Amino acid sequence: MSQAPGAQPSPPSVYHERQRLELCAVHALNNVLQQQLFSQEAADEICKRPLSQLALPQVLGLILNLPSPVSLGLLSLPLRRRHWVALRQVDGVYYNLDSKLRAPEALGNEDGVRAFLAAALAQGLCEVLLVVTKEVEEKGCWLQTD
């Protein structure tokens, strides 16, 4: 079918979810996949399930995006902002390296860091990024297979 001279071709049909609440990770996944495959509940379940399967010795560190209360001096405001927090193992001990802390906070062994992650995820609206080497990422060995 030919078009009239000077006519513009019709744009392709592009799936696009608009921002709703603070579900940008879900919207980004669905937009990349070009269909609504993920819901907040599905994404939350995926986050909770790999927690027990993380091969922590293969992970260089973790970066969490957490809700953070807003305060003015001693006055706490009913607002929540987002805050990025780093977790890392040093000499066999996992530490919370939150820049708001006066000093690193020891979380202990793998059980300690898993408990910290579980508590953070239970708050809701928490995102976890894994920092791994290129080799670990390519092999996908940051998850235990058993």
Image: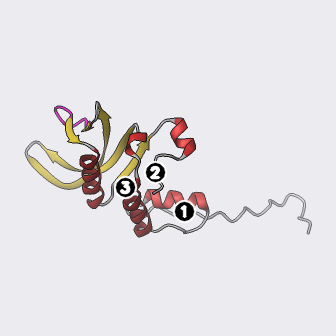
47 vs 141: above or below: below
Out of 28 and 16, give the one closest to the viewer: 28
Q: Which residues are magenta?
A: 97-104
Q: Secondary structure at mark 1?
A: helix
Residue labelled with disc 3? 51
Crowding near the residue tagged with mark 2, few <14, some 14–19, many ≥20 C-alpha atoms within 10 Å: some
Q: Residue furthest left?
A: 74
Residue labelled with disc 1? 30
Crowding near the residue tagged with mark 3, few <14, some 14–19, many ≥20 C-alpha atoms within 10 Å: some
Q: What kind of residue is marked 1? A: Asn
Instruction: Tell me residue 123's x, y (percent).
Output: 26, 59
107 vs 126: above or below: above
Q: What kind of residue is marked 2? A: Leu
Cα separation between marks 2 and 1: 23 Å
* Residue contact at pointers 3 and 2, CB within 8 angstroms: no
Residue labelled with disc 2? 143
What residue do we see at 57% from left, 60% from top? 31
Instruction: Tell me residue 116's x, y (percent).
Output: 25, 50
Quadrant assignment, res 32: bottom right
* Residue contact at pointers 3 and 1, CB within 8 angstroms: no
What residue do we see at 20% from left, 38% from top? 106
Q: What kind of residue is marked 3? A: Leu
Instruction: Tell me residue 122's x, y (percent).
Output: 27, 61
Name the N-terminal-most of marks 2 and 1: 1
What residue do we see at 51% from left, 57% from top? 28
Q: Is residue 127 left or right of residue 68?
A: right
Cα separation between marks 3 and 2: 9 Å
Instruction: Tell me residue 52's x, y (percent).
Output: 36, 56
Cα separation between marks 3 and 1: 22 Å
Please identify, in this view, whether the residue under mark 2 or under mark 1 is nearer the observer: 2
